[in-house]
Image (cartoon, rainbow, N blue to C red):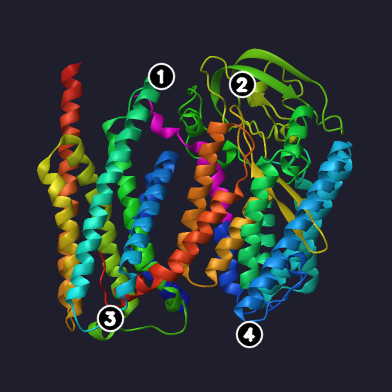
Amino acid sequence: MESSILDSLGVEIIGVMAPVSICMFLVVLLTYSLSVTSDPQIRTAANLIYLENPSDSATVKLEGSIENAIVFVVLVAAVTFILVLLFYYNFTKFLKHYMRFSAFFVLGTMGGAIFLSIIQHFSIPVDSITCSILLFNFTILGTMSVFAGGIPIVLRQCYMVVMGIVVAAWFTKLPEWTTWFILVALALYDLVAVLAPGGPLKLLVELASSRDEELPAMVYEARPTISSGNQGGNRGSTLRVLVGGGGGGGGVSDSTSVELQAVRNHDTNQHGRGNSHNMDYNAIAVRDTDNVDGNGDGNRDGVERSPLVASPISSEHSTAEVGMRGNVETVTDEEMSPLVELMGWGDNNSEEPRDLEESLNRGIKLGLGDFIFYSVLVGRAAMYDLMTVYACYLAIISGLGCTLILLSVYNRALPALPISIMLGVVFYFLTRLLMEPFVVGMTTNLMMF
Amino acid sequence: MTVAAGIGYALVALGPSLSLFVSVISRKPFLILTVLSSTLLWLVSLIILSGLWRPFLPLKANVWWPYALLVVTSVCFQEALRFMFWKVYKRLEDVLDSFADRISRPRLFLTDKLLIALAGGLGHGVAHAVFFCLSLLTPAFGPATFYVEKCSKVPFFLVSAIIALAFVTIHTFSMVIAFEGYAKGNKVDQVIVPVIHLAAGMLTLVNFASEGCVVGVPLLYVVASLTLVHCGKMVWQRLLESRNQSSGSQ
């Protein structure tokens, strides 16, 4: 019996939503279990001007938080512009090393601090030498997984999520008012930076795509490896329900597939340069793609075999694209463009967001910043009550869904923060102000419906 | 120990739906999306309802009729929303069918439609359990428990988890009944769903009497199992019919 179209629809969307959900869930767990031990105030780029004090009046808090938010956004914008400039003048290598350094720094220091507090809180018996060796190994592996070849994509995805968790857990220590204003300000900034002409992230994405280069940024790539487990589906994509068709082919990394595709294949990994030649051609590839991901140099020689063989290495900088001819469908596993994320680590951290871009024949990328700020919102909600957590989670996920649908309509880089954050904030306050008294009043009398 | 108790309560309420989710829903991404959107719809309906009732809260704890009114309005509102959900689903089904035609694959099978209805119902049920039971569980992870006066024999968290389980069952399977009823134009199935929902809501009012939960909760489970049996019978019949049709047409 032929499989129904239901099997394959929405793989891509779930491929992005799953890691975001995992990230948010773990941040909520962290804030829940560590909320007692976490130190009261931290000083970061996000509250340079004003340190919130619970006893301050509402006006003081309001002004202070707005100032904090403005300063933070300005910092983020400045760092982004610097990154764009560096990228424009081809300091790609420097940028990559910088990203590696940031990853090392984040995992080593901030991650280390979080591990320490976990160890203290649960009284895990570990001696300091073992702990530091473990931490060092963990950090080094994470650093290598950023912009490096030969690392399984799953590992990179895991480390992206871990970094998101670490930074988000750190940000949840910000005072309440400042957190809300910073989230809203960042969502607005994201909107401008990605959509406005001359916005830094827009410039960056355009620059990268015009040069066929990988974005020098921390980006989560959704690939079907993550959705392993359902095989036999074809890869129709929900995003393209209204546009394209679905070819045959198995779910994940091993499948036999028949595809008719326009392939663009850049192989870059050999040249440290980050880009090189690419070839465009159409190929009818009938192949068995076992183990696509393990196959490091698959697409170097891969003229004939290219479409599915975007190996992690090369697709890291290269974007193997699978175009569509006729209505032949694109392979979900191609990743591509960017939900961009850049991180600029100021003194402590000032990262910046993300945006979500995608084009018709590309997979989905989500910037690390999106992970972080979604999780910050949920983590902040977790400090109030579980009910707000669920409401915010649903709001954020549905916002992400809306963004993904818009993505398939507009086919260009889109900011992933605004819709989600706005929905999240609105739902948080609605839940807190309206729903909680209602639900609590009902359930304590054991009324339900 | 208390953590174990908290997790236990959560699993009492959501365990069956969790296994349903893992074994059936999570295989198909589209169904996960359906669950999510139906959960969101239920949340929105709850927020709107609480917005409407907010001016009248808190209700007096010793008068029962405002609660009855509240339950009736909420059920009516949610049933109206269920009908809208059906309308949206209908359009979605058309889109999916035409999409399937275009890529020359089979249209949605009967089982697919039933699965989508199940996912929609599961979303409603999970949302119910999450907001009425799970979100109040936070204190259960702490070193104490909580009893309400009117049901003094059982911890509050356990009662609410048990009630939530009944409602999860009712919501999940009444959605399947409702969708089939709408699709076939079967008046009985269309009417029975709001009736079940209303009856279940009204039965919780029994808890209002002192020690009423001893009677109310078993009655609720009777309703839940009736829903389950009716749904099972209906689906079985439909599957037999469609098998006969397909073998007849060959």
Q: Which residue is mark 3?
A: B154
In the rendered image of this protein, does residue A193 appear above or below residue A178? above
Q: Residue B29 lies in what quarter of the image?
A: top left
Task: Indicate the position of residue B214 as horizontal and vertical percent values.
Answer: 18, 77
* CA separation in Å, label 2 and label 3: 62 Å
* CA separation in Å, label 3 and label 1: 58 Å
Numbered circle sitting on residue A55: 4
Q: Quick check: marks 2 and 4 in contact, CB under 8 Å?
A: no
Magenta region: which residues?
Answer: A1-23
Q: Is residue A374 magenta?
A: no
Q: Which residue is mark 2?
A: A323
* CA separation in Å, label 1 and label 4: 64 Å
Question: Residue at left 33%, top 47%?
Answer: B120
Task: Indicate the position of residue A20 as horizontal and vertical percent values.
Answer: 57, 51
* Type of amino acid at the residue the image marks with label 2: Gly
> In this orientation, does residue A174 appear?
no
Quarter of the image that includes the C terminus of chain B: top left
Left or right: residue B110 compared with residue A297: left
Report crowding for label 1: few under 14, some 14 to 19, many 20 or more residues within 10 A (C-alpha).
Answer: some
Number of residue marks: 4
Report crowding for label 2: few under 14, some 14 to 19, many 20 or more residues within 10 A (C-alpha).
Answer: many
- For label 3, the SS is loop
Tell which of B55 and B130 is nearer to you. Answer: B55
Left or right: residue B171 compared with residue A148: left
> In this orientation, does residue A369 appear?
yes
* CA separation in Å, label 2 and label 4: 59 Å
Q: Residue A135 lies in what quarter of the image?
A: bottom right
Give the chain letter at badge 1.
Answer: B
- For label 1, the SS is helix
In the rendered image of this protein, does residue A147 appear above or below residue B199? above
